[in-house]
Amino acid sequence: MYYSRALITLLLSLMLLGCNDEKTPAELSSGEELYNYYCKDCHATKGPGPYMEHYSRDKAMKPYKVILMIKYGYNQEKHSMPTFDQLSEQQADAIARYVVGLQVTQLLNK
């Protein structure tokens, strides 16, 4: 009897752990998920940044330029962006494509 209760408790615990939908940062894969986790807070308060402001008015950036900013950051007199070297190439690419897609949408809605 004791073993069956212990087994049932163990199985229920494992099932509940498996229902956790929250992903760790390393498990995030879509551009929107990654952008929301790594980028949104800062860019919502500080804006797109000097490079993105220029491109969002005229034309969409190329994904590789966004990837370079994500992976290596930049530091200018009044503006800077940290590096996100913990992101894989696939994650950086997903964010870049998401950001470029947002820019294209803005340009089409003008």
Image (spheres, rainbow, N blue to C red):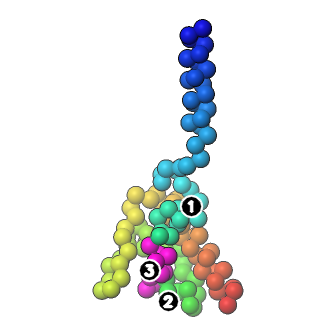
User: On the image, numbered disc 1 is attached to which residue?
Assistant: 33
Say which amino acid is labelled 2.
His
Q: Disc 3 and disc 2: Cα gap in Å? A: 15 Å
What residue type is disc 3 on? Lys
Secondary structure beneath dot 3 equals: helix
Q: Is residue 93 visible?
A: no
Going from N to C along the chain, the mark reached first, 3 or 2, is 3
- In the picture, measured across the screen, residue 63 lies left or right of residue 50, that is right
**For the residue carrying disc 2, how many other residues have a C-alpha within 10 Å: few (<14), some (14-19), or many (20+)?**
few
Q: Quadrant of the N terminus?
A: top right
* Mark 2 residue element: helix
> Which quadrant would residue 105 be assigned to in this image?
bottom right
Report the Cα–Cα distance between label 3 and label 1.
Answer: 20 Å
Query: Closer to us: mark 3 or mark 1?
Result: 3
Cα distance in 3D space between marks 2 and 1: 25 Å
Q: Pick whichever of labels 2 and 1 is earlier in the sequence.
A: 1
Report the front residue among 11 and 89.
Answer: 11
Name the spot of residue 81 as percent of width and height, x first.
Answer: 38, 74
Picture disc at residue 54? 2
Residue at horizontal 56%, vertical 23%? 10
One can see residue 13 in this view? yes
Which region shows up in magenta?
42-51
Q: Secondary structure at mark 1?
A: helix
Q: Which residue is mark 3?
A: 46
Query: Image height check: is 110 above or below 65?
Result: below
